[in-house]
């Protein structure tokens, strides 16, 4: 079953890259979307065929990921999504004319290598346990706190930086993945009556808010950054929750936990490098500097 779960997760990763490409093109093509998405922007997207195509592809990928989460531990399945970062960069080169520089390659290698080691090590030690009733409450409360923090960010920041948006989205979808795994195992091993509905409600809230952050991240910068956030921050968060809350790594030796921590830091460093040196990000920074200089020049002349 683990092999099937890994295969489904890999296909879901490819779907994530394609879905992100189409949805980013639709969101970025809207007028003034870089200032943040309003309700009018969202309603406009519902009639955009490219955005809907991306949504359909993401839906298929999500379905595959849900099945994989039911068949294998979170620690094994969720990190495989990092493969979509490589696919996303290749799609960007082909469809958007993305320029490849040394920093971009370095960031992708760090992200992918770090999360790949996650999979290799997690698969050797992770185990699935059933958490029923009160045992499922800690994950519910953690998800509630993350959702509350997400709402605060949404209300406080009018135009949040893309890195903030993808971190928030990654943490929310880490909660989603862990709750999906918990609820799926409850259903498959204990029956429908043992499913904790508050965890279902928590994951639905996290999906809704996380999706809002993802769409705003599309408007704020390149899709590769969104993919990096979802495929690095999401699995790292899911592994932490799987380890601490679900006890998936209870039998793991200390050295293994240390190695997993180090590889996680390497992958996160890749996201930071990508957020600073991505060609599209650098182009936007150049445009903003030129705009500021132009404004200052006009002010001095007047």
Image (cartoon, helix red, strand yellow):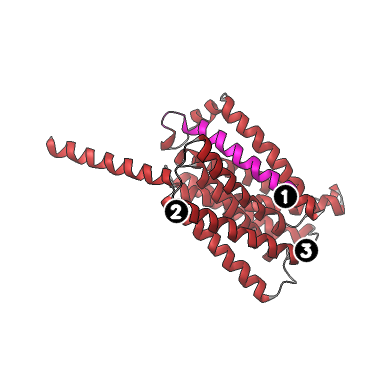
According to the picture, the residue beneath numbered tag 1 turns out to be: 180
Pointers 1 and 3 in contact (C-beta within 8 Å)? no
Q: Which residue is drawn at 79% across and 55% down?
A: 2
Between disc 1 and disc 3, whose residue precedes? 3
Q: Which residue is drawn at 74% across and 46% down?
A: 8
Res 26 visible: yes
> Residue at the bottom extreme?
254
Between disc 2 and disc 3, whose residue precedes? 2
Cα distance between the residues tagged 2 and 3: 39 Å
Cα distance between the residues tagged 1 and 3: 16 Å
Between disc 2 and disc 1, whose residue precedes? 2
Q: Is residue 69 above or below residue 117?
A: above
According to the picture, the residue beneath numbered tag 3 turns out to be: 127
Where does the image place residue 252, in percent across and percent down from the top left?
A: 72, 71
Residue 142: in magenta span: no
Q: What element carries label 3?
A: loop
| Residue 194 badge | none
Q: Is residue 172 above or below residue 219?
A: below
Q: Residues within 10 Å of mark 2 (few under 14, many from 20)?
A: few
Q: Is residue 52 above or below residue 221?
A: above
Viewer-nearest residue: 74 or 81: 81
**Relative side of 14 to 127, left or right:** left
Quadrant where the C terminus sits is: top left
Q: Is mark 1 on a helix, strand or loop?
A: helix
Res 147 visible: no
Extent of the magenta region: 7-32
| Residue 102 badge | 2
Q: Residues within 10 Å of mark 1 (few under 14, many from 20)?
A: many
Cα distance between the residues tagged 2 and 1: 38 Å
Where does the image place residue 20, in percent across and percent down from the top left?
A: 57, 39
């Amino acid at each position: 079953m683990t092999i099937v779960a890994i295969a489904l997760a890999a296909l879901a990763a490819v779907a994530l890259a394609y879905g992100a490409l189409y949805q980013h093109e639709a969101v970025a093509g809207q007028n003034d979307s870089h200032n943040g998405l309003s309700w009018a922007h969202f309603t406009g997207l519902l009639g955009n065929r490219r955005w809907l195509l991306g949504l359909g592809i993401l839906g298929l990928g999500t379905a595959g990921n849900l099945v994989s989460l039911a068949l294998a531990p979170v620690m094994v399945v969720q990190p495989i999504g990092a493969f979509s970062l490589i696919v996303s960069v290749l799609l960007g080169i082909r469809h958007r004319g993305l320029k490849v520089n040394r920093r971009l390659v370095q960031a992708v290698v760090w992200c992918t290598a770090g999360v790949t080691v996650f999979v290799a090590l997690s698969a050797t030690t992770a185990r699935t346990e059933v958490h029923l009733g009160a045992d499922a409450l800690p994950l519910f409360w953690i998800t509630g706190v993350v959702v509350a923090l997400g709402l605060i960010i949404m209300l406080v920041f009018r135009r949040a930086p893309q890195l903030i948006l993808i971190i928030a989205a990654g943490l929310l979808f880490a909660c989603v993945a862990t709750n999906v795994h918990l609820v799926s195992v409850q259903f498959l091993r204990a029956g429908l009556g043992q499913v904790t509905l508050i965890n279902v409600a928590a994951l639905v809230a996290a999906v809704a808010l996380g999706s809002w952050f993802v769409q705003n991240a599309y408007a704020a910068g390149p899709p590769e950054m969104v993919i990096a956030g979802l495929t690095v921050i999401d699995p790292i968060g899911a592994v932490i929750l799987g380890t601490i809350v679900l006890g998936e790594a209870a039998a793991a030796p200390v050295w293994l936990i240390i190695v997993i921590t180090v590889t996680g830091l390497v992958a996160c460093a890749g996201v930071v490098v990508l957020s600073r040196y991505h060609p599209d990000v650098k182009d936007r920074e150049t445009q903003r500097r030129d705009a500021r200089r132009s404004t200052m020049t006009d002010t001095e002349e007047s």
